[in-house]
Image (cartoon, rainbow, N blue to C red):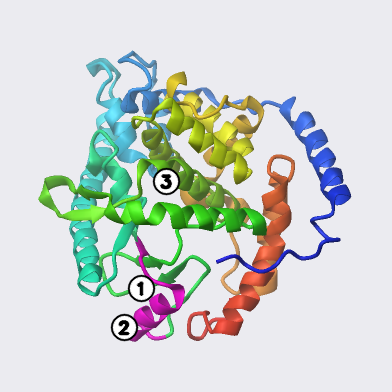
Amino acid sequence: MAFSKPISKNGLRNPRIILTFAKMAQKAENAMDKKTILFTPTEKKFFQLIKLAVGGIPDVTIEIVADEWATLYDMSRKQAMTAIVLDGVEKLPSGQKPPTEVLMPWISLVQQTEAHNRNLNRLAAKVCAKFADEGMGSVVLKGQGNALLYPNPLHRTPGDIDLWVNATRPDLVAYARRFCPGVEVVYHHVDFPVLKETEIELHSTPSWMNEWAMNRRLQHYFGEWKPESLRHRVQLPEGAGVIAVPTPEMNRIYLLVHIYRHLFDEGIGLRQLTDYYFALCQPCSPEERAATVKVLKRLRLKRFAEAVMYVMQEVFGLPDAHLLLPPSPGRGNRLLSEIMLAGNFGQHDTRIHHHAGETSLARFRRKVSRNFAFLADYPGEVLWSPLFKLWHYTWRARHGYFAQGKTH
């Protein structure tokens, strides 16, 4: 489903307006490219530990002084990467390990992550089986499916259960509200709070884009990928059960869109980039790679993909053979700086914190204002952002999709 028809043939689709914005954005980007953001020595060591963990570099000695370990541990928590970074720590020589007062709580947190993953694997398989019994196939997005790509699937920091259900949005809303009256509905999913252990989101579509024409194309691609993804079934670790997950072809696009989406809406952390790293490490023929790049260009994601490729090499050590496109050092450096500042889903970004009584208008202004910081790099998505948000608000109000008792 697309949002609506284009605003106007004489509005944002006017070639002169588009050309003017493009020139402004290019001029601003050229100025920004001259200003490289420098990372601290400790941040660079953090990146080295990640490379060591995922196999981006061979086993090496990283000179880390005792006082730096507490900061590195905090970075791993901020980015929801505690288990992955500890995998790198364990590859260091014995004399380079963290002090006991840092290492013990670190190990304890990783053990909790492993236990949480085991429980979530069991729940994901159970929920998928329940929907299958109801006659609705489903695909587990991100989450436990992505974890299977990791060297140790129990070391991905888990989140909730996102199910792309083979049903229309009206049918999903009716189904969810049968069990949970008045639950919230947004463009791509319906809240389904039926489990105490974890949140569930029922997706009518995996994601979206702000720009009308690009979203229409994206939804078309999702429609093409859906049948095969519903059949793409995998076994969860330790015999927890079987689930369907997106195909590698879909994940090469979808996971990038997911990162793009969160960059604009909440902030993004390295956990989501780690998912994409392991997706790119999967077997991919030159023909498949070329097809992926073609889709990225059609969705106007080439510029963002080039920035992500820089992060893939700078943080994870992704070999050139797995790159989709040549990295962009300028945009990539700015993206990595944003990632390190915001943390996992922007939870550590003081720029987007707000008061509990924030009004809908204040929320709108805050989010749009933040997004304009990305205008030079991604002008299309930024300029369409306020239009999408206005449309989304009125669409939800018209259909009664706000949570009961909420208007924003």
Q: Position of residue 43 (x, y in %)?
A: 49, 28
**Is residue 98 among the parts visible in the rendering?**
no
The one of 389 and 41 positioned closer to us in this rendering: 389
Closer to the eye: label 1 or 3: 3
Report helix, strand or loop for mark 3: helix
Tell me, yes or no, whether the highlighted magenta stretch contains residue 164.
yes
The crowding category of the residue bearing disc 3, from other C-alpha atoms within 10 Å (few below 14, some 14 to 19, many at least 20), is some
Q: Which of 24 and 152 is in front in this view?
A: 24
What span is colored magenta in the figure?
Answer: 163-181
Name the element at disc 2.
helix
Identity of the amino acid at label 2? Answer: Phe
In terms of sequence position, does the residue under pointer 2 or pointer 3 come before the other?
Answer: 2
| Disc on res. 192 | 1
Decide: is 396 above or below 213.
below
Residue that appears at 80% across and 41% down = 22
* Left or right side of 145 for 372: right
Looking at the rendered structure, the secondary structure element under dot 1 is: loop
Is residue 238 within the magenta segment?
Answer: no
Q: Nearer the viewer, residue 199 or 290?
A: 290
- Residue wearing tag 2: 179
Please tell me which residue is depicted at 18% across the width and 54% down the height of the picture.
242
What amino acid type should be assigned to the residue bearing mark 3? Answer: Met
- The label on residue 3 is none
Q: Position of residue 247 (x, y in %)?
A: 35, 45
Q: Are marks 1 and 2 in contact (CB under 8 Å)?
A: yes
Quarter of the picture holding the N terminus: bottom right
Check residue 250 in the rendering and tell me which mark sits there, or answer none.
Answer: 3
